[in-house]
Image: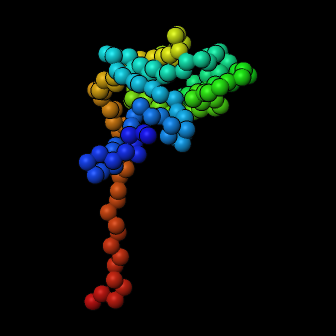
Amino acid sequence: MSTSTKFRGGALAPFDWTNLSWLPMLAPTIRVEDYLDGDRYVVRAELPGIDPAKDVRITRTGDTLRLDVVRRESHTDKVHSEFHYGSFSRLIPLPGGVKEETIAARYADGILEITATVGLTEPTAREIPITVEPAVKVEPPVKAEHAGRR
């Protein structure tokens, strides 16, 4: 019996993390890690067993990277499999200042690595010119004379 169904000291034991039979209930996802290394932003995704040229698409929309991956099932007689097959997506928020032209990706040993340069925007000072319009001469209003003055 799994420890998740055993009672210890009168209380139900916590999840038995070695028993992964509950995993199929969760939606499969792409596992990633990301970090900043100086001015370089790095995202690493675990994608073993795929052909990156055919099965991976990376797009940037605004401040988000999207990974779309397809893991194709080989047609062999299996006794047991815990692999997840099908289409998977993952959205990864980008830090501010990512330079579009520096985004690059490479795949090796089952790991997809995406890198980008993060440029810090330096505050700059500049003088704002003032456009001077010619003065408009304003005539004082003419006082109307009262017609019935005595």
Q: Quadrant of residue 96?
A: top left
Q: Position of residue 76 (x, y in %)?
A: 72, 21
Q: Residue at x 34, y 43 (%)?
A: 14
**Residue lying at the far top of the rendered structure:** 108
In the displayed structure, 3 sits above or below 37; it is: below
Residue located 54% across and 21% down the image: 47
* Residue furthest front in the image: 1
Residue 34 position (above or below residue 111): below
The spot of residue 70 in percent (x, y) is 64, 26
Q: Quadrant of residue 48?
A: top right
Of residue 51 and residue 81, the one placed in the foreground of this image is 81
Quadrant for the N terminus in the image: top left
Can residue 117 be seen in the rendering of this structure?
Answer: yes
Left or right: residue 77 versus residue 35 is right
Residue nearest the viewer, comparing 54 with 115 = 54
Residue 133 visible in the shown view:
no
How is the structure coloured here? Answer: rainbow
Q: Quadrant of the C terminus?
A: bottom left
The furthest residue to the right: 75
- Residue plotted at (34% across, 67% down): 141
Residue closer to the observer: 109 or 116: 109
Give the vertical position of 7 relative to 19 (above or below): below
Query: Residue 37: which quarter of the image?
Result: top left
